[in-house]
Structure formats: C-alpha cells, structure tokens
Image (cartoon, rainbow, N blue to C red):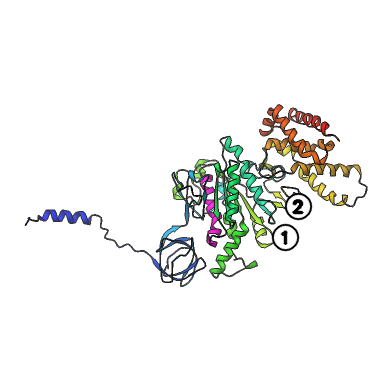
Amino acid sequence: MAEVKPAEVSAILREQLAGFKSEAELEEVGTVLQIGDGIARIYGLSNVQSGELVEFESGLQAIVLNLEEDNVGAVLLGPAGNIKEGATVKRTGKIASIKVGEEIVGRVVNTLGLPIDGKGPIGGELFDMPLERKAPGVIYRQPVAEPMQTGIKAIDSMIPVGRGQRELIIGDRQTGKTTVAIDTIINQKEFYDRGEPVYCIYVAIGQKASTVAGIVQVLEKAGAMAYTTIVAANASDPSPMQFYAPFAGAAVGEYFRDTGRPGLIVYDDLSKQAVAYREVSLLLRRPPGREAYPGDVFFLHSRLLERAAKVNSSDAIAQDMNDLPESLKGKVKGGGSLTALPIIETQASDVSAYIPTNVISITDGQIFLEPNLFLAGVRPAINVGISVSRVGGNAQIKSMKKVSGTLKLDQAQYRELEAFAKFGSDLDAATMGILEKGKRNVEILKQGQNAPLSVEKQTAIIFCGSKGILRDVPVNRIKEFEAEYLGLLEAQHQEILDGLRAGKLDDNITGTLEKVCLNLAAKYKA
C-alpha cells in the first residue's frame, strides 16, 4: 500500500477549498399565487422594486408593476407556457433593458431587442439600454433650431419639424398617417448618402405582421433600411410587449442620441399602446378613470415623449447627463438629438377625446390629417388650418422661410373663400385672384406616396406658387409643369438649387427662378 503523505492531502484540500465562499448567498424567492392573461401575482418578494425584472424557473422574465400589501403583480414578457400556481420566482435586482449596438441598424427586433427577421443574432459590441429612463434635464438640452427635413412640401413649408422636436401626426384611420412618417424616413436617405446619417427607428404597435412586413419591403426598396431599425410588437403579441415596445424604441434612439448623432423615432401608434396599457392595468385591478383608462395613462405618454430632445452640444455637459446607463459612461458625446413623430388615431375626427388631447398637450405641435381632404384627392390630406408647429420658423432654412412666409395665410384665406364660391355668385377680381392662386397652391402641395422632395426643389416650386406666377397655367396641368420646371432647374441651373439648399435667396436666385418659371408658364398658357 502506497504511503499517503499528509502534505499532499493538505495541498489537495487547500486547492478544493480555494473556490469556497464562506458567506451565505441569499436569493429572494417568491411563489406564484395566480397566473393568467399575461399577469402573475407573486407572494414572498417583499423587497422587490417597481419596474424590476423577476425570473421564473423556466427562464421567462416579467416586470413588476403593482406593489400590494401581501403580493406583487408582474406582467409577463412572453407566453406563460407551463408556469403553474406554486412555481418559484426569483428577483434579479435589474431593471428591464435591451441590448443595443451599431449592428441593430437595418434589423427588425421585438420589444426585448431580439431579432425577428431571421438574419441571426445581432453582432458587434452591445450596450445595456434601460427601457425606462428619466428624460434629460433642462441643463442638458438645447432649443430646437436645426431642421428635420421630411421631404413633404406641405410640412416643410408650413408646419416645419426641427431635430429634437415632438410633432404629433393625428387623424382618422386610412388618412395616410403612416405614409407621412414613412416618407420622412425615406427622405433621410439624402443625408445618409451625404455621410451625415439620421438614424431612424420605426415602432409598430399592435399592427398586423403582414403590414409590418409591407413597411420593411417599402423601406428596403427605397434603400432606407441602411439606417433604420424596426421595433415590432404585433397584434398577436401579449399586451405587455405592445405597451413596452415604444420604450424599447426610445432606448434604441437614446443610444444614437447620447453618442452625439441625430435620431428619428416614429411611434405607430400610441392609441394602440394606450389600449394595451389599459388592458394590463385592468387585469392588475387598477382603478379605471376616464374611458376606462388608468389614471396614469397621461404619465405613460409624457415620460415616453419627453425622452425626445436636442442634447447640449458641449461634451463636458452631456457627460454629466442625469440617469445615464452604466454601459454608456465614457462614450457620451454632445450635440445628439432624438426627434419623435408619435401617431394617434382619432374616431370620427374627434380631437377632443381623452388620448388625443393628452398627447396634443405633451407634443410641440400636430399635423392633422382630414378624411374629407383625403377623399377629395388632396394627398397628403393635411388640414393646414388646425395643424401647427410650435417650433415654427426656427426649424426652417432661411430660403424656405422667406418663400413660404405667406403660404399658410394664403391657404387659410382660400379655404374660407372656397365655401362662398360654391354659391356661384359673381365674385370681384381680388376674390377670384385669391381663389385661383389657392387652387394652384393646393395642386403644388399635392405629393405622391413614397416620393419625398429635397428642400431646394420644394423651395423652388413654392416660390412660383406664392408669387402667383402660375396664374396662366391650367390647374389640371400644374403637376406636369412642376416636373418640367424642376427638371429644367436641375439640368441648367444646378448652382441655383445649391444656393437654395444653403439657405440663400438673393436677387440673382429669385430673378433666375422667376425667369425660368415665366418662360415655361407661357408654354402652358391656354
């Protein structure tokens, strides 16, 4: 028998005991009391915090929303599967977050940030971005003064949107709300090609999966997926996934904003998010308020939309921003922005309903789309009288500001007189002049789907309309005139277009535009 040396035994014991932790590790574990409808009631998690992630044995996660005396209510982030009463749940000590990195661009992800486009996992360096986060404080913001070009003539001229603004798109169903948002995303291709990309996030809430697939296809065809991320919580997904989807989109947008780049986020639409939140709240037995929505539905939208901001251009100030996630520390740059385009669907054009009034009061203006205009063939069907941008001319280039100064007033006058003109009485020359000019301006402001126009071309055609040079061109040939006019400018006067893009509008530019316009109008004279 081999002799056992005590030194060897003690060395082996020492090695085995090296990894031993003497302090006890305590995990707070609870028990499921009740589960169903995407809600779990859990007993025993007495120190859990609101908004904290908890984990079931199966690996499914849930977010704690209700803290009651004897139990907590949590919403499940996925199907309940085989979780039964009596199952154990443990605290994670973390708040809900998603992983975001450069390679999330061009992908379709769900609320948890997991890809659902079948192109494999998201690679590259990923950062933890919390779903819920405090909006930047006043010190860390800057006024909105930089234009966010939408490519839509009616918006860029009369209801301009700036980077860091929150502009609501509101209207009945089937009036072209999503089209306005998608066209704005497609228009950012110009900046991407120039090497100054605006990172776009499209959040689809409670839509059919086929609709989302159609939008992905439109964006791919236009080459816009190169700078766009889609966050989709489809109609078949559980309610918690639908109401957290905008927060996941905001977390992606904040990654680009806080690293000093411009972002644009579309929430399509917040009415469906409010309905999903109402469903969850009623299941959690929260007391219902107006239209059965919970009392904090206003807070739900305000804390989401406040996250859109123009960040202070100083890196030193931006690095001290409140509520920065740990993962971003040391990577924060100033001057980034996040522009939000929330969408709200109204019923029978009722803007005074609960959710529409709430969101109107939070945003910096609204673009109102009207069914009557849409059916009359005026597309985009923007009602200029009700639509407003509270940032206004600050978010316009100088040339556009000068050209479109009177356009909104002209159109308002035209709409007013149009009603009188229907009576067919004899009208004086001044009234006829306003009506004729208005008709032509309406034609100019019409625009096809997925055909955004660069700002210099918009300025050039609106100049002709607001100066009243087109009075000899028949109304039904305005579109034909516009295409020919812009083609001429592109072919022969590119320097004029470049000047307009730079914001110049001197006598030389206006003289050239007027000359080209008049020469061409003579050709169309009836």
Q: Earlier in the sequence, mark 1 or mark 2?
A: 1
How far apart are labels 1 and 2 at the CA level?
14 Å
- Which residue is labeled 1 in the image? 348
Tell me the element at label 1: loop
State the image coordinates of residue 197 (x, y, percent, origin top left).
56, 39
Q: Eyeballing the image, is 81 above or below 499?
A: below
Query: In the figure, is residue 486 to the left or right of 63?
Result: right
The magenta region covers 238-258
State the image coordinates of residue 155 (x, y, percent, origin top left).
70, 45
Identify the image quadrant of residue 312: top right
Neighbor class of circle 1 (other Cα within 10 Å; few <14, some 14-19, many 20+) is few
State the image coordinates of residue 132 (x, y, percent, origin top left).
51, 56
State the image coordinates of residue 393 (x, y, percent, origin top left).
69, 42
The answer to which of 139 and 439 lies nearer the viewer is 439
Quadrant of the drawing holding the N terminus: bottom left
- The answer to whether residue 463 is seen in the rendering is no
Q: Eyeballing the image, is 24 above or below 414?
A: below
- Which residue is labeled 2 in the image? 375
Residue 382 shows which numbered tag? none
- The answer to whether residue 97 is seen in the rendering is yes
Q: Eyeballing the image, is 358 above or below 447?
A: below
Confirm whether the magenta stretch covers residue 343: no
Residue at x 84%, y 36% (from the top left corner): 472
| Residue type marked 1 | Ala
The answer to which of 73 and 365 lies nearer the viewer is 73
